[in-house]
Image (cartoon, helix red, strand yellow):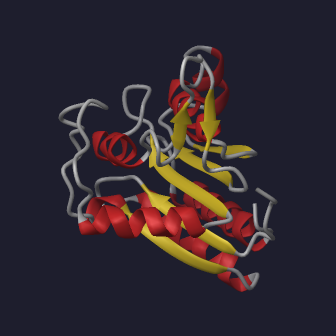
Amino acid sequence: MEKKSMKEIVIINGHPNTNSFNTALAERYKEGAEQSGSTVQQIIVADLAFDPNLQYGYNRRIELEPDLREAWKKIKAADHLVWVHPVWWGGFPAILKGFIDRLFLPGRAFRYRDDSVWWDRLLTGISARIITTIDQPAWYYRLIYGSPSVKSLKRSVLKFCGVSPVSVNYIGSIRDSNEKDRKKWLKKVYHLGVNLK
């Protein structure tokens, strides 16, 4: 698939609390992207009505709830996905994991090849950015822990399905932050949106 000009942006807010700083970051990115002339839609995972449990794995398909069908339409139409989520226990919140489990399925986001270890990526032509909040310095999360949440989302989900390139921004340490820090991070995210990154 030929890469489209970056105009359709979908922001996926994976924090279960819609009053979180993650929501403020998502809103600032949206403001910046709209300032650049892009069309921006949001998927606020906490507001969706769906069962996050992939009960039967890949053995039996569960029909998608209306909110998930609408979310998938947005993702498929996007040029650029912006994932905003906190890091909890080295990963992302359970509700975001359930969202991915239910939507990024064989035949939808990727397709296994018969009698082969290889697969077809069905989300090519889409790029992404991960904006993740952490309670430690970014260098510490990368060096000591190996950035497990980023490896999971960037490599094992997005790139596996053909989304590329995928950029990452770490925001933190949130736990020790003050109002000045948060204003600085909000400004940074706003400019990422303005510059369509």
Q: Nearer the viewer, residue 134 or 29?
A: 29
125 vs 131, left or right, is right
Asked if residue 186 can be seen in this view, the reply is yes
- Kindly indicate the quadrant of the structure image that contains residue 86: top left
- Kindly indicate the quadrant of the structure image that contains residue 61: top left
Say if 5 sits above or below 149 in the image.
below
Q: Nearer the viewer, residue 52 or 86?
A: 52
Considering the image in quadrants, where does the N terminus appear?
A: bottom right
Taking the spot 57% from the left edge, 33% from the top edge, the residue there is 150
Say if 10 sits above or below 45 in the image.
below
The percent position of residue 16, horizontal first and vertical second, equals: 29, 53
Taking the spot 65% from the left edge, 51% from the top edge, the residue there is 129
Asked if residue 19 can be seen in this view, the reply is no
- Kindly indicate the quadrant of the structure image that contains residue 54: top left
Taking the spot 70% from the left edge, 44% from the top edge, the residue there is 166
Q: Nearer the viewer, residue 125 or 16?
A: 125
The percent position of residue 3, horizontal first and vertical second, equals: 80, 60
The percent position of residue 57, horizontal first and vertical second, equals: 27, 30
The percent position of residue 118, horizontal first and vertical second, equals: 63, 23
42 vs 131, left or right, is left
Considering the image in quadrants, where does the C terminus appear?
A: bottom right
Farthest residue in the front direction? 114
Say if 17 sits above or below 93 in the image.
below
148 vs 191, left or right, is left
Taking the spot 62% from the left edge, 50% from the top edge, the residue there is 123
